[in-house]
Amino acid sequence: MTSIPISDISKGAKLIFDNAPWLVTEVNFVKPGKGNAFYKCRVKNLVTGNVLEKTIRGGEKVDTADVSDTDMTYLYSDANGYVFMNQSDYEQMSVPQKVVGDDKDFLLENMECQVTLWNGEPIQVRLPNTVTMEIDYTEPAVKGDTQSRVMKPAKLKGTGATIQVPIFCAIGDKILINTESREFKGRTDK
Amino acid sequence: MVERVRRFFAERSVLEVDTPLLQPGANLDHGVMPMRVGDAYLPTSPEHALKRLVAAYRHDVWTLAPAFRAGERGQRHQPEFRMLEWYRLGWDDARLADETVEVLRLITALPGPAERLSWRDAWTRAGLDPDAVQAEGGFTRDERLDLLLSERVEPLLGRGLWTMLTDYPASGAAQARLRRDPAGRPVAARFEIYRDGIELANGYHECCDAAELRARHDAELPLHLGCAIDAQFHAMLSDGFPDCAGVALGFDRAVMLALGLPDIASTMP
């Protein structure tokens, strides 16, 4: 952990406040004439995603967070969590379940993810924006209706998660899913 | 823009002067940190040098000079910028505020009338009472006042017009003389001009009391680590400084406004 003057930080800096790592998404220098100087920063908590405004006195020092993004491949899950392999040094790392959260629904073996490390510990896993998954089970397809907005549940192969898909989808279809919104984006094979 | 300013002052017999960039002592304004070069300080405004010229030659003077302020970088701040500063002998702050608006109109060509608004009335306009502000969230009362001023009060000033903010609290006098407002409260004979929420100029009916100014600078000195008092400047004050009003106008901010640029950095090469 290093301390730097607040005047040295810019957008993208990663800092520690209240024992948590935060990403600076916006910095504004404010100072009335012959008055005190302040830095108003918009920061995002890298663990919880919370966003808040921090006002810091000009001349104060802040602690930088040792945070880095690493490309890793998901291998398998066990009782302790999810095991990833660092693509550069092939080291394996176990990521706790709570860090992966609901993203586990779309996490398939050999998927390439970005794992954010703080002081060497994983704090966030970013899946690809879009993943392709196969429908394991769904109600029989309604043929011909490819424009329908009527949805039905479909269970996904590999994770067993259920998402809403249009009624024309059938078992065995490979579908595209937006991992952020958890929505059906289309079919890959038809 | 500079040509228009030059003609304006020539027509009024205000003498254009150059000021040195190395000062033996520092400007000691609250919240403004000078930069140090060797054993000298760069001016945070040409104030000290201009005042010494005013004292020596008893003549109205103006300059467009570089100014430097450590650690100031943002949308409306750059560590190096240009200050248009001038002094008028025998004038008071109200008269100089009018002329400052005239100069700003000349530089920016922006339309709109001018209004005079006291510092207290500006807070009232924002629905705030400065007397009710308390220390909070780890910030002192003084800091909270500055934060609220920047966030709530200043954005309302100079919207489509030129706001002359007057009657500053005595604690924010800097180098202005003190007087009483209509309610009998001590206030500083200081004004700032705002346009579209942006502070453009800061002027005073100058304090000529050498002992008073020395006391104000002595009080600021501990807040300016590594800075020395400008002994040359204070010696001049002791020898007698004439009754006058002076104003410093952030030239680059005026240019930013005139050209509709998003920040000060865009006005620079």
Image: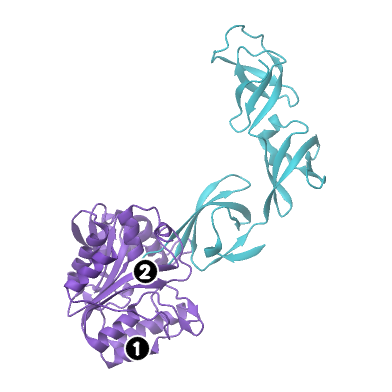
Chain colours: A cyan, B purple
User: How far across and down, in percent of the image, does residue A38 sit?
Assistant: 46, 63
Residue at 61 percent of width and 18 percent of height: A165
Mark 2 and mark 1 lie on one chain; the one further toward the N terminus is 2
Q: Which quarter shows the C terminus of chain B?
A: bottom left
Query: Hey, which residue is sitting farthest bottom in the picture?
Result: B239
User: How far across and down, in percent of the image, does residue A144 sit?
Assistant: 59, 6
Q: Identify the image quadrant of residue B267.
A: bottom left
Residue at 72 percent of width and 15 percent of height: A172
Q: Is residue B260 above or below residue B222?
A: above
Q: Which quarter shows the N terminus of chain B?
A: bottom left
For the residue pair B164 and B11, the one nearer the viewer reads as B11
Do callouts 2 and 1 mark residues in contact (Cβ within 8 Å)? no
Q: Are marks 2 and 1 on the same chain?
A: yes
Q: Is residue A181 left or right of residue A157?
A: left
Disc 2 versus disc 1: distance between alpha carbons?
24 Å
The amino acid pointed to by label 2 is Arg
Q: Is residue A32 left or right of residue B190?
A: right
* Residue A4 appears in the picture as rendered: yes
* Residue B181 appears in the picture as rendered: no
Q: Is residue B128 above or below residue B37?
A: above
User: Tag 2, which secondary structure?
Assistant: strand
The amino acid pointed to by label 1 is His
The circle on residue A10 is none
Disc 2: which residue: B82
Disc 1: which residue: B234
User: How far across and down, in percent of the image, does residue B164 sit?
Assistant: 23, 63
User: Tag 1, which secondary structure?
Assistant: helix
For the residue pair B242 and A122, the one nearer the viewer reads as B242
Q: Identify the image quadrant of residue A31.
A: bottom left
User: How far across and down, in percent of the image, does residue B161 sit?
Assistant: 23, 55
> How dense is the environment of label 2, judged by Cα within 10 Å: few (below 14), some, or many (20 and up)?
many
